[in-house]
Image (cartoon, rainbow, N blue to C red):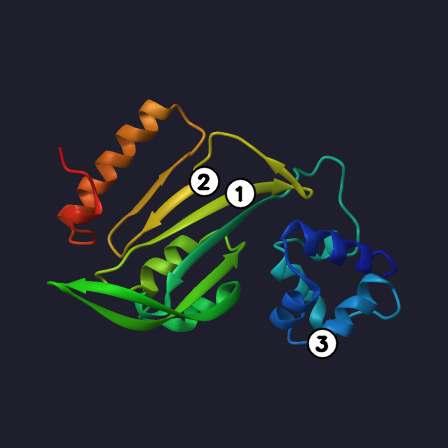
Amino acid sequence: MFIIGDVIKAKRKECELTQEELAALLGVTKAAVSKWETAESYPDITLLPKIAEQFHITMDELFGFCPKEQEPVIINCYKTVFYLSAIEDRSVLDHGTVECKIQKYGVEIGDEIQYKWEVLVTMKSVKPDILYIFQKCMKPDCYIDFVSERRVNGKLIKDNKPNKHYVCQKKIWEYNLEENLALHSKYSNEMLQEQLAMGLISEEDIDID
């Protein structure tokens, strides 16, 4: 079991989690995570499946056993910022690490600006199906955008997989920010027109030719 602490530390950093964030996800203290990583103590045996599930690895991998022929595990980390009012089912917040703050913003109504206070949520998740989970939990008149990055063994990889995502109840739009700019612009314009038709945005939000 001596290698478990090294695996936990490596996977935690790979998922860009702090010791405090991982502790919150596992229901333990930050001190417990710190002791695991320095081999001062080891996780309770009942926690091992939960730790493996959190990092999307097998128990063999948690114990440091990984056959050479096994394909490396690629992890997609999704990041998003949204107003809590866009969410109908707040259980979606259980699927990642979350930070919240209160933010004041102005809404122009006629010649006046009305100010509102909102809970602004910053969320990070490595769940492969997080976009579809959001679809089921969102309000019908809202959309939320995400960026994602792919890592293998803690190293960032760049490929042609989508890394920009827009989610509403009816559809998910995805594209790669590093693609040809002309294609990127074409796709963005088509997406904006669809969002306009769905009532998710107004003509004031985009430049209409």
Q: Residue at x 51, y 67 (%)?
A: 99
Task: Say which element carries label 1.
Answer: strand
Secondary structure of the residue carrying tag 2 is loop
Marker disc for residue 202: none
Q: CA distance from mark 1 to mark 3?
A: 28 Å
Q: Is residue 88 left or right of residue 129?
A: left
Point out the tag, 3 or 2, that comes first from the N-terminus: 3
Badge 1 crowding class, 10 Å Cα cut-off, few under 14, some 14 to 19, many 20 or more, is some
Amino acid on which disc 3 is placed: Thr
The amino acid beneath tag 1 is Glu
Rate crowding at label 3 as few (under 14), some (14 to 19) or many (20 or more) other CA atoms within 10 Å: some
Left or right, 103 with respect to 39, comes to left
Q: Quadrant of the C terminus?
A: top left
Q: On the image, which quarter does residue 176 sit in?
A: top left
**Above or below: residue 116 compared with residue 178:** below
Distance from disc 2 to disc 1, alpha carbons, whole Å, reads: 6 Å
Image position of 75 (left or right of 105): right
Marks 2 and 1: CB-CB under 8 Å?
yes
Q: Tag 2: residue type?
A: Asn
Query: Distance from label 3 to label 2 (Cα)?
Result: 33 Å
Q: Looking at the rendered structure, which numbered label has been put on residue 149? A: 1
- Provide the residue designation for mark 2: 163
Most extreme residue toward the front, as rendered? 111
Indicate the position of residue 50 as horizontal and vertical percent values.
64, 67
Q: List the residue tagged with mark 3.
A: 29
Place of residue 187 in the rendered image (x, y in percent of width and height, measured from the top left) = 28, 32
As drawn, which residue projects farthest toward the left? 110
Residue 27 in the image: x percent, y percent? 64, 76
Residue 48 seen in the current view: yes
Task: Using the image as rendered, state which of residue 37 and residue 204 is in the foreground.
Answer: 204
